[in-house]
């Protein structure tokens, strides 16, 4: 992600912790919690969930969505996902 599409510290978090792809998807809560933990560990300023979502919403290729799988419903994002951890 370029710094033009995301503001610091979100740009640094996304570069380190996320993959951008058309097929990518993630729950909003998972992305926000990962960002909040990442920011805390680095002493970076955090964002409110609303501000975090607003910035993601303005990112090209990233769109808000609602997941419906079996009995599970949740808000999320398409176009971004957390990198797989090894």
Image: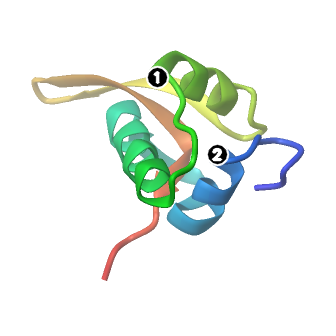
Q: Position of residue 70 (x, y in %)?
A: 13, 29
Q: Is residue 62 above or below residue 85?
A: above
What residue is pinned by disc 1?
49
Figure quadrant of the C terminus:
bottom left
x then y, percent, for residue 53: 56, 24
- Work out which residue is located at the far right of the displayed protein and give it: 4
Q: Mark 1 falls on what kind of element? A: helix
Asked if 40 appears above or below 45 in the picture, the reply is below
Which of the numbered marks, if any, corresponds to residue 10?
2
Q: Nearer the viewer, residue 41 or 22?
A: 41
User: In percent of the image, x 58 and y 67: which residue is there?
Assistant: 16
Which residue is rendered at x = 72% and y = 41% of the image? 61
| Residue 20 in view in this figure | no
Callout 1 environment at 10 Å: few (<14), some (14 to 19), or many (20+)?
some
Residue 12 lies left or right of residue 49; in this view the side is right
Sequence-earlier tag: 2 or 1? 2
């Amino acid at each position: 992600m370029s710094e033009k599409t995301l503001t610091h510290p979100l740009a640094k978090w996304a570069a380190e912790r996320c993959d951008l792809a058309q097929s990518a998807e993630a729950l909003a809560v998972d992305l926000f919690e990962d960002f909040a933990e990442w920011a805390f560990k680095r002493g970076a300023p955090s964002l409110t969930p609303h501000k975090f979502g607003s910035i993601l919403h303005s990112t090209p290729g990233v769109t808000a969505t609602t997941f419906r799988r079996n009995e599970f419903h949740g808000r999320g994002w398409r176009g971004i996902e957390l990198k797989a951890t090894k």
